[in-house]
Amino acid sequence: MRWRSLMHASHKIWAVAEYEFIGAITRLGYLVTLIGMPVFMACLLALSSLATVRSARESLSRTRSIGVVDESGLFSSSPESIETELFPELGKIGNMRDMPSRVRKTELKRFSSLQQAHAALQAGQVASIVRIPADYVGSGKLQEFLGPKREFDLSSGQVAAGSLLRPWLVRGLLKGRIDPAIAARAADPALIERLVIDAKGGVAPADLIREIRPLIVPIGFAILLLLSVFTSASYLATALAEEKQNRALELLLTSLTPDQLFWGKLLGLGAAALLQFLLYLMAVAAPAGLAYSALGLNLVHGLVGLCYFILGFFFFGAVLLTVGAIGNTQKYTQQLSVVCSLSGVLPLMMLTPLLSQPRGVLARILTYIPFTAPITGLLRFGADALPWWEFGLSLLVLTISASLVIRVCARVFRVALLATGATPSLAQLWQWLRTG
Amino acid sequence: MTPPSTPQGASLAPLLELRRVSKRFGSHVAVDDVSLVLWPGEIFGLLGPNGAGKTTLLRMGVDLLRPDSGSVILLGDSPRPAALARMGYLPEERGLPTRARLLNFLTYLGELKSLSRSDSRNQARRLLKRMELDVRETSKIGELSKGNQQKIQLASALMGDPQILLVDEPFSGLDPVNRSLAIDLLKESVAQGKAVLISTHQLQHVEQLCQRLLLLNRGRVVLEGEVGAVRRSHSDGSILVNGTGDFGALPGVERLTRHIEGNGERPIRLFLRTGVTADDLLRQVIDRNLSLTSFSPHVPTLEEIFVHAVEKPDARQP
């Protein structure tokens, strides 16, 4: 008998879950988020990098002119131009590799007086003027004059001409006084090759992608998780509020219990969110992992993400489902949903302290708070700063919290579904919790 | 409390019983000590002004609300999922998921009533055909007219072939043709041995459809019983006559008024003196050779009884 009623209940839960799942994945909003979001992000990234590269190329192709007024006479035989290599690390990255030249040439125009130089600056013939005073050797001071209008320089930032001139000044000061090779080295004394010693003692050149991996892998996973969980969980809440508002719920609740409805909706929408997460994972993480092996993405990342996803969805889904049941208008439900969602996004707001100290106290605390655990856990795991025991403990805390929240929310849900009128007070919610 | 009455000829067990149920929301008593029995093959009318407690009573009937006291007996037992699946409910405040497609939504409801998917789909198709909406089975509910949405609401209540139908204002928003269709559907259900509990303000439908009724006011039962008996019991003994002559001069007549019938006829309504019966009056008419084309006791309409009972809540039926 008990077995039959269990089968009966599971049949209904399955029917609700299937109906909600199909309803969710065929609605326009889901499809737009599923397909549109990665396409939008990819387009945005492509456009942004295209614009940056284009601008950098244009900037590099232009010869920058700096006016020099050498009152010290120390640099009269120094070269008339400076060549500076920009973005030395960019040569290792994607489309930057194709950039024809990352060497920027800066022309130095000499002026015999400051007045002449000022006129040239105002006429736009030079970008700035550097005055080398007569007592330069004693004081070391230079003056830089800038024009009233300046363009933002993407290729080298707003580097002061004085800094740009540093190797030129060193070479000029030492010319003819010491060995030319030593003079050249003094001008550029530190050509650093960065090497990494791995766990086995092997030495390999440092890789930019590997260096930023602790940043992009966890953030990438966290964003995927947030997108999947919150788009579906928020839909869950607003759809329920709509059903409650238009009384379609009464019709459903004559055929099944609030608990069956609760579980059916949670599972159905959870499956839709999981599908979204897996598709994102395949569309974004897998190609990224293949393209950049240095990211070190592997199946473990996917599994850890999946664990946090499932528990995170049940936790937030139950909370948001209850929000949908409590809210008497869609607007009110949306407002409450945003508050709940923000609590989940909190770790991303604290990204800097979390990633700079992924084993710190703050990171550890947030790993065990159910609202922040999924994202913090993922951030720390991606940064290789989540030991297995902490991962297990965090999942355990999340599991217990999710099951508690589901039980509590189901109680409120039972009563709240048929409640109409004003939004309930805290006292009323407490009463529902006791009577549900 | 008046014990629940049994309709004539009913020999089967009741399908639904509400035994002395009460429900309060905070300090407001919505339903107070109400009993009701629904037998197979009957249409039962639940009447009452707005806020009388009808919807709360129906909600307790379908187990959406649990009574604070009293009990609900469904198919001989306390409401259980299997028994609840044999009920159909049409709530007063209608709402359907506007994005859902007709056939899919009805099939879903059938599955929730424990039908297999294919059975549910077949039944949904039959109902859509009956509702003359079969050509629109793939349309979204939101694309239908208001009247057609009402029909889908009724179809939703009929999914799963329920034994008991609890319908709240089933005819509101329907045009005469669709109202007639809805009435036919309810009559067909009853002919198959099912029971229907209708909550409505449209009293002519209660007179037309229901065998028994229960009138609620402020959560309490004001009157109940068979429709004909209720009407007769509220007769004041006056007589409606059509004819010529001075009926006012008859010794048994205390006063007379012109009565306007629903069919437009205007018979004379004669109020009798104390102790004078209809037989006495008829004899007086014959003795005085008054011309008479009709002579019948006046039986008040349900509307008159409703207004009287609601305006004078203490005037409970004996």
Image: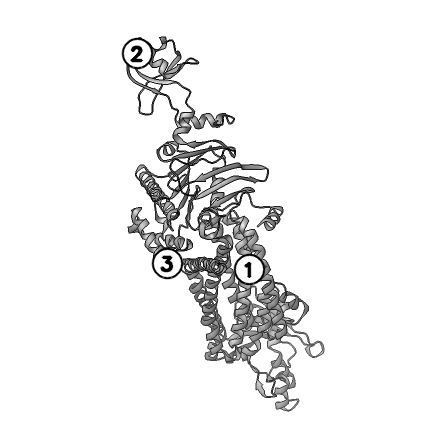
The mark that comes first in sequence, 2 or 3, is 3
Tag in front: 1 or 3: 3
- Left or right position of A266 against B39: right
Q: Position of residue A281 (x, y in %)?
A: 48, 70
Contact (Cβ within 8 Å) of mark 2 with mark 3: no
Q: Nearer the viewer, residue A151 or A410?
A: A410
The residue singled out by tag 1 in the image is A316
- What is the CA distance from the residue labelled 2 to the residue labelled 1? 86 Å
Residues at discs 2 and 3 both on one chain: yes
Most foreground residue, A200 or A45: A200
* Mark 2: amino acid: Ile
Q: Position of residue B48 (x, y in %)?
A: 46, 33
- Amino acid under label 3? Arg
A13 is higher (above) or lower (below) than A48:
above
Q: CA distance from mark 1 to mark 3?
A: 32 Å
Q: Residues within 10 Å of mark 1 (few under 14, many from 20)?
A: many
Could you tell me which secondary element the residue under label 1 belongs to? helix
Q: Which label number is shown at residue A57?
A: none
Q: Which residue is mark 2?
A: B286
* Residue B110 drawn above or below residue A94: above
Label 2 lies in what chain? B
Q: Report the front residue among A173 and B301.
A: B301
Distance between the alpha carbons at the discs numbered 2 and 3? 71 Å
Residue at x-position 34% and y-position 52% = B124
Front of the two marks 2 and 1: 2
